[in-house]
Amino acid sequence: MPPILSIQNLRKAYSGGFEALKGVSLDIEEGEIIALLGPNGAGKTTLISTVCGITMPTSGTVSVAGFDILTDYRQARSLIGLVPQEIALEPFERVINTVRFSRGLFGKGRKDAAVEDILKRLSLWDKRDNQIRELSGGMKRRVLIAKALAHEPRVLFLDEPTAGVDVELRKDMWDIVEQLRADGVTTILTTHYIEEAEAIADRVGVINKGEILLVEDKDKLMARMGQKQLDVQLTTQLDAIPEALAGYDLALSQDGWTLVYSYDVNAERTGITKLLTDVANAGLQLRDVVTRQSSLEDIFVSLVHENAEVTV
Amino acid sequence: MNWSAISAIYVFEMTRFFRTLAQSLISPVLSTSLYFVVFGAAIGSRIQEVDGVSYGAFIVPGLIMLTVMTQSISNASFGIYFPKFIGTIYELLSAPVSFLEIVMGYVGAAATKAMFIGVIILITSFFFVDIEIAHPLAMILFLVLTCISFALFGFIIGIWAGNFEQLQLVPLLIVTPLVFLGGSFYSISMLPPVWQTISMFNPVVYLISGFRWAFFGLTDVPILTSLIAIAGFTTLCLGAVWWIFKSGWRIRQ
Ligand SMILES: Nc1ncnc2c1ncn2[C@@H]1O[C@H](COP(=O)(O)OP(=O)(O)O)[C@@H](O)[C@H]1O
Ligand SMILES: [Mg+2]
């Protein structure tokens, strides 16, 4: 199946000359949930704004279900719903009217049942006749989501949906995204919370300084996270890993003082006991033993860090 | 054409208008009544007649024009500036609508509101003076064209404005003087020759003259010139709007 969203070599330079996107390519399959993870200023909002038509791309192409966002903008945009990062709503408008407005704006005829369904799903039905200024921040965010869903889009962008949102609402957001998945809606969300990416995404993309550093299935990332390292610090310095230990997944540290053993915490046998016995049998003395676990956070930090070294 | 979007914008804007209906109407009706009292009764009692029309009646078309022009501009400029200001413009930009459809929605609503107020003023004036409208169809045509062209102009101002001061600056500094000096309260022929010549450079003179012709059949300038002037102004604004649309000026980065 062709990707629902295809971004090819997308560049965006703002009028000041600052290049916020430096050749981003990304294919997104229909129905998946992808989290774009990146620090502030990474270019997440710029990427979304460019795909949605709020800013103009400098070069590169983007297509939605095969429709180019510039030449076939009507078809492309009518498939997309956008929940912006900042809350922007008409304060004196009533909730139900603003959702109806969104539906009309996106070319869908008035359908009260659809609007009712969306408002109920977002727990806004009781507030439908309230003016927006009477709502709490969390409720306003729900209204933004309701507006984005009003025209029944196939692709939903959520730009930092849970930034500054309380725990309860964050859980609700995640539930909403899960429900949308059941309806076959593709969701692209940005976040700088790793837990959020872990909690709901199928795939995780890491973006920094206008470049995508990695896109991987979350499960694979989790598997990497399941890897643990055992540092076996020795009393003698080694030039190479001894023959007797060749059967293990071992690495020697740069300085030669430490053997690093990688193993899977989830495996039935970790092999630690046998390794340590064999290390002793090989005539090596232990000074200390340390275990370390690499988290998604470590992966993220190291990726962003490498990226920073390369570009600075 | 995304008619659904045009009507969504139009309805949304009209809802705002009706939500603040009292405010929207009280101010123009009150100020018009004051104009009648001050200009019509106080000054008019000394002027008596202009070209065979009582002064009170003579100023009616000018008063309507004055209000309709300022209302068209302020409604349309505010209508598009406000979403820019509070950030809701993101939705317009991400929607499957062309710029033309956005313009039709906002300008259509702004022109309708202005026309509504214009009609209210006309009705108010019936309480003060006797008027017969010589060419009702022409009057409606002039009213509609003026509302649309000035709403277009207001839309451009709203796109251009970077803050509320700028939003009010153009109407205050350019439009109000042009309208006051455009023969709302006098016939151009009452001016000294030099000022008559200068007045010919004021586009509003042609609009008011044409509109007044529709009421009383008298003109400061030939009616055809008036029509050409308003058509020219509308074309100019349309051209500017088209250019804004093409270049994304001040809307899409
Ligand atoms: N309108 C703009 N003009 C110039 N630079 C901008 C503009 N918007 C964003 N930027 C810059 O582009 C970079 C990416 O910003 P953004 O996409 O908002 O990042 P993120 O959403 O990941 O925090 C930042 O360095 C930001 O300062
Ligand atoms: Mg952002």
Image (spheres, coloured by chain):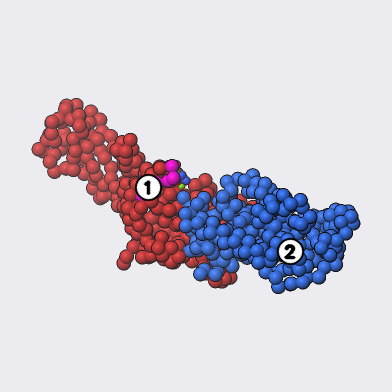
Chain colours: A red, B blue
Residue pictured at 21% horizontal, 44% vertical: A271
Depicted B168 relative to depicted B111: above or below:
above
Q: In the image, residue A11 lies at what x, y percent?
A: 36, 50
Q: In the image, residue B35 lies at what x, y percent?
A: 82, 55
Q: Which residues are magenta?
A: A11-16
Q: Nearer the viewer, residue A196 or B219?
A: B219
Residue pictured at 51% horizontal, 55% vertical: B244
Q: Is residue A7 magenta?
A: no
**Given the current orientation, which residue lies at the most extreme front position?**
B193
The residue at which mark 2 appears reads as B219
On the rendered structure, is B52 left or right of A244? right
Residue pictured at 36% horizontal, 65% vertical: A66
Q: In the image, residue A219 lies at what x, y percent?
A: 32, 53
The residue at which mark 1 appears reads as A21
Chain under disc 1: A
On the rendered structure, is B151 left or right of A49? right
Q: What type is the residue that disc 2 sits on?
A: Thr
On the rendered structure, is A182 left or right of A143? left
Q: Nearer the viewer, residue A123 or A244?
A: A123
Q: Secondary structure under badge 2?
A: loop
Q: Quadrant of ligand 1?
A: top left
Give neighbour class at mark 1: few <14, some 14-19, many 20+ (Cα, 10 Å): many
Q: What type is the residue that disc 1 sits on?
A: Leu
Disc 1 vs disc 2: which is toward the camera? Answer: 2
Q: Is residue A12 magenta?
A: yes
Give neighbour class at mark 2: few <14, some 14-19, many 20+ (Cα, 10 Å): many
Answer with the quarter of the image where residue B124 lies.
Answer: bottom right
Residue pictured at 80% horizontal, 66% vertical: B123
On the rendered structure, is B149 left or right of A149? right
Q: Are marks 1 and 2 in contact (CB under 8 Å)?
A: no
Chain under disc 2: B
- The answer to whether one can see residue B40 in this image is yes
